[in-house]
Amino acid sequence: MKWLVVFLFTSIALGAPSLEVFWTDNSDNENAFLVERKVGTGRFVLLDAVNRNVTKYVDKGVKYNVLYTYRIRARREERFSPYSNEAKATVSEDGEDKINAPTGLGIRIIK
């Protein structure tokens, strides 16, 4: 399973918001990772593809006060992995960026 996390940072040069999406590469045979984004309550669309073994993507095309949801999957030729979990972020102009609840909580019995 690939865990997906989104970090917010502001581009120093332009003062425009950007979101850094990063994940854990659990594949050893992918050709690329596909980064998909949903804006608000819309549908997921392919945002970009990054090379194998790359584990982050910076989305410079975000706007203030809009909810963005991301998911990732690995691709090898015409085959695809299942999707990662979804990660969400909203960038606020007032500096009070929304923090989303963690996901992927589990319990494991240790003997």
Image (cartoon, helix red, strand yellow):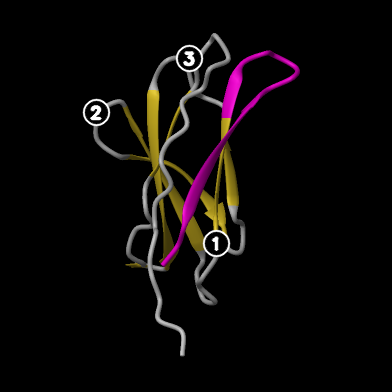
- Amino acid bearing label 2: Thr
Q: What is the C-alpha distance between the residues marked 1 and 2?
A: 26 Å
Side of 55 relative to 68 (left or right): right
Q: Which residue is mark 3?
A: 64
**In the depicted view, which residue is nearer to us: 42 or 109?**
109
Farthest residue in the front direction? 111
Q: Which residue is mark 2?
A: 41
Q: Earlier in the sequence, mark 3 or mark 1?
A: 1
Side of 9 relative to 27 (left or right): right
Residue 30 in the image: above or below residue 55 = below
User: Can you tell which mark lies on residue 24?
Assistant: 1
Q: Earlier in the sequence, mark 1 or mark 2?
A: 1
Contact between marks 3 and 1 (CB within 8 A): the answer is: no
Q: Where is residue 3 drawn, in percent x and y?
A: 46, 58
Give the magenta range. 1-18
Q: What is the C-alpha distance between the residues marked 2 and 3?
A: 16 Å
For image coordinates 55% across by 65% down, the residue present is: 25
- Amino acid bearing label 1: Thr
For image coordinates 59% across by 55% down, the residue present is: 55
- Amino acid bearing label 3: Tyr
Q: Is residue 2 magenta?
A: yes
**In the depicted view, which residue is nearer to us: 83 or 86?**
86
Residue 33 in the image: above or below residue 21 = below
Q: Where is residue 49 drawn, in percent x and y?
A: 49, 49
For image coordinates 74% across by 19% down, the residue present is: 12
Side of 40 relative to 103 (left or right): left
Question: Could you tell me if residue 110 is visible in this image?
Answer: yes
Side of 109 relative to 32 (left or right): left
* Badge 1 element: loop
* Badge 3 element: loop
